[in-house]
Structure formats: structure tokens, C-alpha cells
Amino acid sequence: MAERDALVVDDHPTNRLLATAILGKLGWTVSEAESGETALLLAADRKFRLILLDISMPGLSGEETCARLRQLPEGPAIHILAYTAHAFPEDRARILTAGFDDILVKPITRQRLEDLVRNL
């Protein structure tokens, strides 16, 4: 697994751009995917340490993508953050139960993202 390789998965280019820029400033090498399907293809070829994964995307949902990522040989070791605007307590419980390590609520801030990835 690459030391500081991250993948940002979101169907909205602006959201990917912001997360990619912040992670880049924090020293991560960042790839982007616009869908869960693309994320799975990339993760099959590259070993990501961190994945920011949007929950609400057309096609494969964030939860289903997370479940499939966890099934990869290195899946349990990937730190997967839900990248979402859904921040109600019942959403949080459902998201964490789906296999995510934590939740990054949109709109994101550099400080919050830095806090979540500091020890990776």
C-alpha cells in the first residue's frame, strides 16, 4: 500500500477539486474518480491508503462501493471516509455500520480533513 496515496470519489467535479487540493497541500498524492465503478477499477490497480467516498452518487452508491472496496485483499487496511452532506445522527450510524471509518461532512474544511488524516 502506498504511503500517502489517496482517492477522492465524487460525481461533482467541484467537490473532487476541493478535497484533492486540500489533500495535496497535506502531502498526499491524489487520484480522482467520478463514480463508484471507476473507484473500484482504480483500487484494483493501485493500493490506496485513504479513500474519500461520496455517499450519494448515481449508479453504485457510496455504501455499496465501500462494501466492495472492503472485499479487496487490501480492503480492510484502507481508511475510507464517507464524504457527504448527510450528517444527521441516524445517517452517521448507518454510514459507519456500512464499513466507513469516519465521516467528512460537506462543505469540508482543511482543518477537519487534516484532523481525520493526521495519524494515517
Image (cartoon, rainbow, N blue to C red):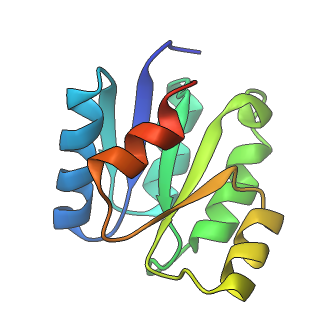
**For residue 60, what is the image quadrant?**
bottom right
Question: Residue drawn at (25%, 71%), measured in percent from left and top?
Answer: 12
Q: Is residue 80 above or below residue 25?
A: below
Give residue 6's position: percent from left, percent from top. Answer: 42, 33
Q: At which x and y percent is residue 118?
A: 49, 28
Q: Nearer the viewer, residue 110 or 64?
A: 110
Q: Picture quarter containing residue 21?
A: top left
Q: Residue at x 50, y 34 (%)?
A: 117
Q: In the picture, which quadrant includes the N terminus?
A: top right
- Say if 60 sits above or below 25 in the image: below
Q: Please state if 62 lies on the left or on the right of 27 as rendered.
A: right
Q: Specify the quadrant that holds the C terminus.
A: top right
Name the side, left or right, on which 77 lies relative to 17: right
Q: How many numbered markers are drawn?
A: 0
Nearer to us in this view, 84 or 71: 84
Name which residue lies at 47% across and 40% down: 115
User: What residue is shown at x 55% (from left), y 80% (from top)?
Assistant: 87
Residue 31 pos. (x, y %): 32, 36
Q: Position of residue 111 (x, y in %)?
A: 34, 46
Q: Nearer the viewer, residue 113 or 70?
A: 113
Report whether 57 appears left or right of 109: right
